[in-house]
Amino acid sequence: MVTAMGVSVGLTAGAIMAKGTIRQKERWAAPLLTMEKIGSWAITEPGSGSDAFGSMMATAKRKGDGYVLNGSKTFITNGPFADTIVFICKLDEGNDPRERKVVSFILDKGMPGLTQSKPLRKMGMHSSPTGQLFLEDVLVEKERLIGESEEAAGGRSGAKATFGTERSGVAAMALGIVEQCLEKSIDYAKTRVQFGRPIGEFQLIQLKLAKMEVARMNIQNIVFRQIEMSAQKKPMPFAAASACKLYTAQAAMEVALEAVQLFGGNGYMAEYQVEQLCRDAKVLQIYAGTDEIQTSQIARSLLGGA
Ligand SMILES: Cc1cc2nc3c(=O)[nH]c(=O)nc-3n(C[C@H](O)[C@H](O)[C@H](O)COP(=O)(O)OP(=O)(O)OC[C@H]3O[C@@H](n4cnc5c(N)ncnc54)[C@H](O)[C@@H]3O)c2cc1C
């Protein structure tokens, strides 16, 4: 649920608020911020995930005073139900796709040529619908181009800023998962009796609880740091946001797996909920940039690259 809300408010409205015109903010961002409408932010395509810009095939071609949009997007949070979609594509001026400008448009549900798929079946995060978008010759006026100028239209820097926001959001979700796992594990360790003793008296179980608490404290500190920086209107540097995302996603996954282990057979059963937390945690290592992509971005920054 937090993923679905985060994408609608943080990413979709966030992208419009960051680079849109006042009219665009009023018309499209306001109903997302008040949650009257649901938003999607669409960059991933069947052939372009980690290499989001390089392999992007979706296009905008100028037509009269507006544009014609084509392409397909996949794994889009809220895609099946979104009222408002930020669609990221490349401006096709007949040049090499790798050299094209990146531009973003705001689309409305029901526009001719836009198809929103049914939700895809997936491993976890079942309360956050994920789907595909198909655009076939969708005609849009210039007022839907974010910023209403090809130069200011969100582009690579706009999308990159959204990646930063997305990465920061993962830490808060990781904290929720870890807190839930720890709380449930403590209760279970106190009440589950084996060999005549609560399992919490075994040192191997205590080690698991202690490691979960260390992870919880670390993630909480990261979230507090992000809140402090945001309150001071200081954007977190991109590599730092990647480091936070990488650490918190991995820690949540490790904690959730250990919670399942601590619950034994019950941990593998849906009834005890740690199984769900474990399935939910996995996606934190995949969306908003995989662990591998975060790792290489942190290293590139340390070595003085972009
Ligand atoms: C539940 C869910 C919700 C999502 N929501 C959205 C959304 O709202 N909007 C949106 O646009 N996208 C969304 N995504 C897409 C998500 O951001 C991508 O799945 C993710 O970026 C990875 O891309 P990919 O799936 O194409 O994997 P690939 O890029 O094909 O990667 C496959 C594997 O190769 C590795 N790899 C790739 N390149 C490198 C490299 N250079 N070095 C080392 N390893 C590499 C990856 O780390 C991964 O392990 C969502 C995905 C999921 C699962």
Image (cartoon, helix red, strand yellow):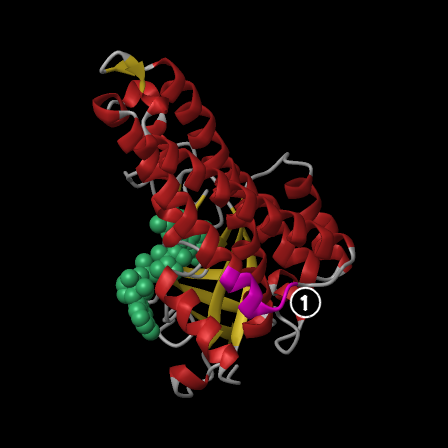
Tell me which amino acid carries mark 1: Gly
Location of residue 279 in the rendering, given as x and y in whole percent from the top left corner: 32, 38
> Which residue is tagged 1?
147
Q: Count the numbered circles shown.
A: 1
- Residue placed at 49% from the left, 43% from the top? 214
Residue 230 covered by magenta stretch: no
- Residue placed at 48% from the left, 71% from the top? 298
Q: Nearer the viewer, residue 3 or 116?
A: 3
Location of residue 195 in the rendering, given as x and y in whole percent from the top left corner: 22, 15
State ligand 1's quadrant: bottom left
- Residue placed at 64% from the left, 42% from the top? 32
Q: Examine the image and state in which quarter residue 119 appears.
A: top left
Q: For the stretch drawn in magenta, what is the main secondary structure?
A: helix
Location of residue 55 in the rendering, given as x and y in whole percent from the top left corner: 35, 74
- Residue placed at 48% from the left, 45% from the top? 215
What span is colored magenta in the figure? 236-243
- Mark 1 closeness class: few <14, some 14–19, many ≥20 residues within 10 Å: many
Q: Is residue 289 left or right of residue 217?
A: left
- Camera sees residue 1: no
Q: Examine the image and state in which quarter residue 137 appears.
A: bottom left
Q: Is residue 213 above or below residue 150?
A: above
Location of residue 209 in the rendering, given as x and y in whole percent from the top left corner: 41, 34
- Camera sees residue 188: yes
Q: Nearer the viewer, residue 244 or 289?
A: 244
Helix or strand or loop: what does disc 1 sit on? helix
Mark 1: is the Cβ under 8 angstroms from ligand 1? Answer: no
Q: Nearer the viewer, residue 82 or 216?
A: 216
Residue 240 covered by magenta stretch: yes
Q: Nearer the viewer, residue 274 or 109?
A: 274
